[in-house]
Image (cartoon, rainbow, N blue to C red):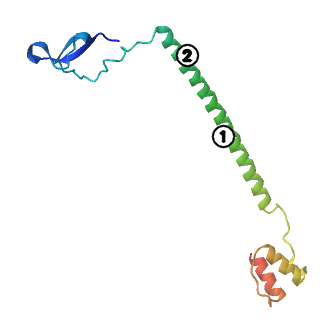
């Protein structure tokens, strides 16, 4: 604990803004504490030792290595996700594209019920009273 305190100077022009006196000599009727933003009751700040600084540096370097490893792991995961997305896109394209050399169905050989089923499967609206030629026209237009 500090044994001295700062008090406002009685002659600021010759003494400056404050003077330092012994704590035991402080008399509140005569003196006014000088507040320069410091805490008189606080212990003076202690500077870290070289060993403490080196230990803190080592901890920071270790954290940096951990962050680098995490970034590498995330980059690898992102690359794997991108490869999987490409594979799925290719698979989807292969499933939705007509096969090369595939022959379109011959609608003229289908029954009216089969034509209704084909139109329904393709989500094509058709009138219930449509004849076979109208149903075939709807299918070939789609």
Q: Which quadrant is the N terminus positioned in?
A: top left
Q: Is residue 114 above or below residue 49?
A: below
Q: Residue at x 78, y 77 (%)?
A: 140
Quarter of the image for residue 132 reads bottom right
Q: Residue at x 76, y 84 (%)?
A: 126
Q: Residue at x 11, y 17 (%)?
A: 10
* Front-most of residues 101 and 6: 6
Q: Which mark is residue 89?
A: none
Label 1 residue SS: helix
Percent from the top left, x then y, of residue 85?
Answer: 71, 48
Percent from the top left, x then y, of residue 26?
Answer: 22, 14
Q: Which quadrant is the C terminus positioned in?
A: bottom right
Check disc 1 and report the residue beneath it.
78
Percent from the top left, x then y, of residue 110?
Answer: 89, 80
Percent from the top left, x then y, of residue 50?
Answer: 47, 8
Q: Is residue 81 above or below residue 120?
A: above
Label 2 residue SS: helix
Q: Residue 47 vs residue 92: left or right?
A: left
Q: Which tag, 2 or 1, sits closer to the chain's start?
A: 2
């Amino acid at each position: 604990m500090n044994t001295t305190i700062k008090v406002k100077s009685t002659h600021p022009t010759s003494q400056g803004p404050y003077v330092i006196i012994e704590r035991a000599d402080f008399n509140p009727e005569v003196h006014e504490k000088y507040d320069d933003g410091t805490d008189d009751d606080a212990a003076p700040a202690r500077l870290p030792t070289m060993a403490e600084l080196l230990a803190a540096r080592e901890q920071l370097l270790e954290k940096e290595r951990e962050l680098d490893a995490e970034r590498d792991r995330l980059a690898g995961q992102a690359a794997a996700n991108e490869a999987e997305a490409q594979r799925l896109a290719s698979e989807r394209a292969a499933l939705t594209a007509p096969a090369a050399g595939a022959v379109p169905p011959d609608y003229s050989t289908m029954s009216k019920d089969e034509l209704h089923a084909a139109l329904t499967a393709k989500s094509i609206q058709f009138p219930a009273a449509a004849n076979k030629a109208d149903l075939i026209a709807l299918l070939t237009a789609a």
